[in-house]
Image: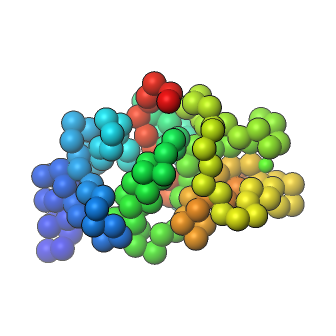
Amino acid sequence: MLLFLFLLGLALGAVSPSEDPQVKLERGSCPMFWFSFNDRCYKYTAAHLTWAEAEFHCVSDGANLVSIHSQAEDDFVRTMINNFDPIDSWTWIGLTDIHQEGRWMWSDGCAAKLFFWYPGEPNNAGGIQHCGHTNHYHKWDDYRCSNTSPSVCASRITCP
Ligand SMILES: [Ca+2]
Ligand SMILES: [Ca+2]
């Protein structure tokens, strides 16, 4: 019954998130299972994938792993994750420094200018952490790209 109500909520394009009553998840003009925020569409993927598998999955949908450009967008992404995953597990975002250590890039090609790292991160622990995830205590952390996590895709935008 609860699942039915949840799916009905998705179909109607609005599901109230439990984390922040001020952020409302709405489908808007996005495809089914995607959510709208500031004219961009976002999708949560629960499957545990490596960072590269997650990016490949997003690209197959004409999107990329999410790039984040404001505090409000970061809040929205975590609220959307929380809606599907109330324990706020680590979740891949589109940030990587795999091409050159310390040169963080978004996989969609937008310049990475604003960061919400957890204090002390990114630490490149063991010299092998080159992919970014959120929900490290609600902030970002760099981790092994071969780890498997849920992920968030976002549609392509004109970079801010
Ligand atoms: Ca690194
Ligand atoms: Ca780290």
- The residue most toward the right is 127
Left or right of 48 on screen, residue 39: left
Left or right of 123 on screen, residue 78: left
Residue 21, given in percent of the width and then of the height, sits at 27, 67
| Picture quadrant of residue 19 | bottom left
Q: Nearer the viewer, residue 74 or 81?
A: 74
Residue 2, given in percent of the width and then of the height, sits at 18, 74
Left or right of 24 on screen, residue 116: right
Colour mode of the rendering: rainbow
Q: Is residue 142 visible?
A: yes
**Residue at 65%, 57% in the rendered image:** 117
Q: Is residue 46 visible?
A: no
**Residue at 56%, 53% in the rendered image:** 92
| Picture quadrant of residue 79 | bottom left
**Residue at 21%, 36% in the rendered image:** 29
Q: Nearer the viewer, residue 119 or 97?
A: 119
Residue 39, given in percent of the width and then of the height, sits at 31, 35
| Picture quadrant of residue 112 | top right
Q: Looking at the picture, does residue 2 appear above or below residue 30? A: below
Q: Name the image quarter holding the N terminus.
A: bottom left
**Residue at 16%, 59% in the rendered image:** 9
Task: Report the number of numbered marks.
Answer: 0
Left or right of 38 on screen, residue 2: left
Q: Looking at the picture, does residue 79 appear above or below residue 29? A: below
